[in-house]
Amino acid sequence: MEKKVIEKRMKIYTGILAVFFVALILRMGYMQIAQANKYRTLATQNHQRLITVEAPRGEIIDRNGVRIVSNKPVYTVSLVYLGLKDSTVVIKQLAALLEGEATFQGMTAQQIESHIQEKINDHKRLYEPVRVAADVSQETINRIDEHRLELPGVNIDIEPVRSYPFGDLMGEVLGYVREITGEQLEARRDEGYNMGDSFGQVGLENIYESYLRGVNGARQVEVDAQGHPVRDLGLKQPVPGNNLILTIDQRLQRVAQDAIMGQIEEARRLGYAKLPPGKAAAGAAVVTDVKTGEVLAMATVPSYDLNVFSGPLPASKYGELLNNRSLRNHAIQTTFTPGSTFKMVTASALLEEKILNIHDSISDPGYYKYKKDWKPGGHGVVNIVKALRDSCDTFFYQFGIQAGPDLMNNYAARYGLGQPTGIDLPGEEVGRVASKELKKKVWAGNEWESQWREYDSMDMAIGQQETKVTALQLANYVEAIANGGTIYRPHLAKRVISNDGNELFSFQPEVLKKVDVSVETLDIVRQGMHEVTIGGGTASGVFWGAPYTAAAKTGTAEVGDAAQNNHALFVAYAPYENPEIAVSVIIEYGGKGSGIAGPAARKILDAYFQFKKEDAQGKSPAQAAQQSEQPQTGQTTLPGSTTPPAAQEVQPGSQGQGAPSTPGTTPQDGGATSGAPSQDEGIPDTPATGTESGAGSGSSPPPGGVLPPQSGGETGGTADNTGRQQGGGQGEPPAPGANGNQVGLPDPGTNGGQVNTTGQTGTQ
């Protein structure tokens, strides 16, 4: 009985096994025959990867065809994270191999893993390689290649990164490129960006991102069991970005940048630049074409070598750049008190509103009521032209009261001060122009100081009070005076050229507005500015020996209690008869406008006309730059090779090459001669308080030599112990006065005025 039961069970089990094996055979047959194509495709896909090939960004080229931003190939290390077994072990080992690379300095394996996890949180991109390190050295690449079997999912590629042949040239104006941030990626999902893509963060790289970025390609590869590419299956070539042609002349840019740095050092040497604790000296220069608004040079100091952003950037280095204000474009993002460079605004208001004419004059005793002029004893008989030439504070004190804040504010706006210029750069500061409303806001809570007082109008007339402007605004303002009243939108981009040479876009001059000032008024203002540069004008020493005519205005703006902390400003255009370019220069804490900022402007103007002469003689700037370049040799190699990728960038032999020498700064006409004192005091070894002088002392220099910088000063009012603004203005050496209707000044103590007995003097 028991035997029969066992046999029965065996038959059942055998039948079940038979059915199972039949079903298994049928299923295998179905999969291998009927579903063969499906599983063959799946198997193939499991061993293939689609790798993004980053497109090179377009180059940035100066107006003469010289490359100032290009690309170079570098090694990158990326990681395919999904399905990676023992990911922690792999990441730790990779971190150890990358220990010498700046990307991983001071980071633990856990921090690296967290960093990678942040990049792959988007599950739609789990199979996309995540870039772990860029600009990796050949030595490190070789070490990684030796351990490839232990590093599944780790890939080595060659990608283009930005190269800046001229180093610190244009700094924050050009801007830099870094990996797109999560926030930027989220905002641009529909524009084809992927994590790991490069993105212009600031400057021109940011503004023209859509033109400069290319179209990424793709490489389909077969990978082994560890995810390493073993065979290329297909390639979609990337499309390079478009090239951006600038209005900038890199030669003039270098001269401007070096001139600013040189004059900052000169201010330190003379003891003017006594900076507040923790502050680094800054400066800016802007050069524009007065007939188009094109920016020919925009220098901002301190600058930095843009190449530091092309590779790993340690936090300490970024902090250093941030702290010394290198990451700020001081030409458009820092505002300064204009000092006496504002006097053309006041003069325009006085002439246009018939408060005075060119024949009206005053007798200047060196003070007006409770405010002193920068020049003890005054300037004698002064009309509007001489007031500009000598930067006579007394003249502008008196008539500034008659004009009042509303009128001066109105004319400042006509010239574009306190308004956006529309420059094609991000982050432009607008500045501000003094007004009754602004003073109430600034002095909120102080009943007395919140009210506009007579001395506020006096200070405003000489460019003090609460007025703040940028170097670009000053250049635009002087440009409008030079060209007859047209304010152009300043721009840095000239053309956009596709990678195959076709012009996609050309930037044309754009008139923002016409200055509502008559031709007659502009003629008088221009005459006053021209006389600044000749005779005994405050900048006559600056333009001594110049082979061209010019018009200019000095400015020395008080910004604190210590006269040594005055800002130095200088504006000019040339030639006087047929203007071509306008220049503005600001040296923060430079001390004196004509003595410190003036020589920088002179170097820039000299360079412009020298380069123009050379170009007319057929000397190509692009060829000259090419001859001075020293490109690295070599060729791009595949990962694992012992030869690093070649750096496809030029290395200029001299960044300032081609800059002409600047004639010595010596007095002209009415200025001092050899062995004779000037009509103004010469620049002493230690800073003089409250004045800016117009000529140097000592013997004439040898050919090509340089005398001590000339100064024609101006400073604005500072607060005395009552909180009231005192002093102010900008003065220069005396000159013969124009005879006209003489308007007498009140005697001291009359009309409620008192002679300033605090010792405060005005400035030039």
Image (cartoon, rainbow, N blue to C red):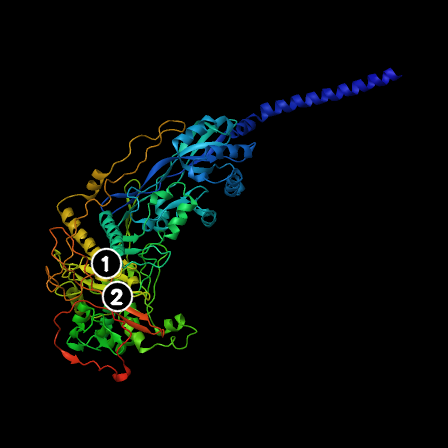
**Residue displayed at 17% across by 72% down:** 379
In depth, the one of 339 and 488 nearer the eye is 339
Identity of the amino acid at label 2? Thr
Q: Which residue is mark 2?
A: 689
Question: Which quarter of the figure is the N terminus placed in?
Answer: top right
The residue most toward the top is 3
Q: Amino acid at mark 1?
A: Ile
Name the outermost residue toward the right: 1
Instruction: Indicate the quadrant where residue 684 lies.
Output: bottom left
* Above or below: residue 12 compared with residue 134: above
* Residue 515 at least partly seen: no
Q: Residue 42 location in percent, x, y?
A: 54, 29
Could you tell me if residue 683 is visible in this image?
Answer: yes
Assign a secondary structure to mark 2: loop
Direction from residue 388 to residue 504 in the image, left or right: right
Nearer to me, 285 or 6: 285
First reached walking from the N terminus: tag 2 or tag 1: 1
User: Between marks 2 and 1, how big is the CA–CA gap?
Assistant: 15 Å
Q: Foreground: 185 or 639?
A: 639
Residue plotted at (32% across, 35% down): 647
Locate residue 760, reporting x and y percent: 27, 71
Rendered view: 426 above or below 378 = above
> How far from the left and from the top, in percent, is residue 6?
83, 17
- Residue 677 occupies quadrant: bottom left
Q: Residues within 10 Å of mark 1 (few under 14, many from 20)?
A: many
Using the image as rendered, state which of residue 353 and residue 100 is in the foreground: 100
Between marks 2 and 1 in the image, the one whose residue lies nearer the viewer: 2
Mark 1 = which residue? Answer: 596
Residue at 27%, 80% (x, y): give it: 754
